[in-house]
Amino acid sequence: MTKNESGLREQAQHSPKNKLGGVHTTIIGGRAGKKLIKLVGQHPEIKKVIPALISVKGIPGGSLTGKILRSDARGNLRLLISEGRSYQKVRIVTTVGTSEEGNRIMK
């Protein structure tokens, strides 16, 4: 393991609270939404959780739901949180480097 890889893994071991970043730190769903983000952030290979803008969808929904979407070429994931008429995309930055490893984390 190279020095850079060990540094990334060490950074990923930090508290899930420290992993939340980005400009938009508001999470939809209140306590349940924050609990979902905290659960995702507990994974040892998750480096950063970055929420995006909260958007409105056309169809009124129901309770809070979360869905992990496929990984990109670098192994980073996206989480789609939906509650009522609102939804929010959350980018999940991982320590892995390929799409195959990102899919392994997703499972």
Image (cartoon, rainbow, N blue to C red):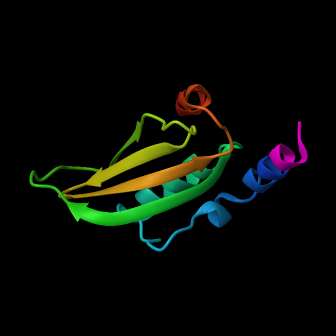
State the count of labels: 0
* Relative depth, front residue between 45 and 84: 45
Spot occupied by residue 102 in the image (x, y as percentages of width and height):
57, 33
Q: Is residue 81 left or right of residue 71?
A: left
Q: Residue at x 9, y 51 (%)?
A: 59
Spot occupied by residue 56 in the image (x, y as percentages of width and height):
18, 61
Q: Is residue 83 left or right of residue 98?
A: left
Residue 50 highlighted magenta (yes or no): no
Quadrant containing the N terminus is: top right
Spot occupied by residue 40 in the image (x, y as percentages of width and height):
56, 47
Spot occupied by residue 3 in the image (x, y as percentages of width and height):
90, 47
Q: Residue at x 81, y 44 (%)?
A: 5
Q: Is residue 80 left or right of residue 100?
A: left
Up-down relation of residue 60 to residue 75 (above or below) = below
**The magenta stretch spans which residues?**
1-6
Prevalent SS, magenta region: helix
Up-down relation of residue 105 to residue 58 (above or below) = above
Whether residue 64 is visible here, answered yes or no, is no
* Relative depth, front residue between 85 and 73: 73
Q: Is residue 65 left or right of residue 100?
A: left
Q: Quadrant of residue 45?
A: top right
* Relative depth, front residue between 6 and 19: 6
Whether residue 16 is visible here, answered yes or no, is yes
* Relative depth, front residue between 105 and 17: 105
Up-down relation of residue 69 to residue 92 (above or below) = above
Q: Residue at x 86, y 46 (%)?
A: 6
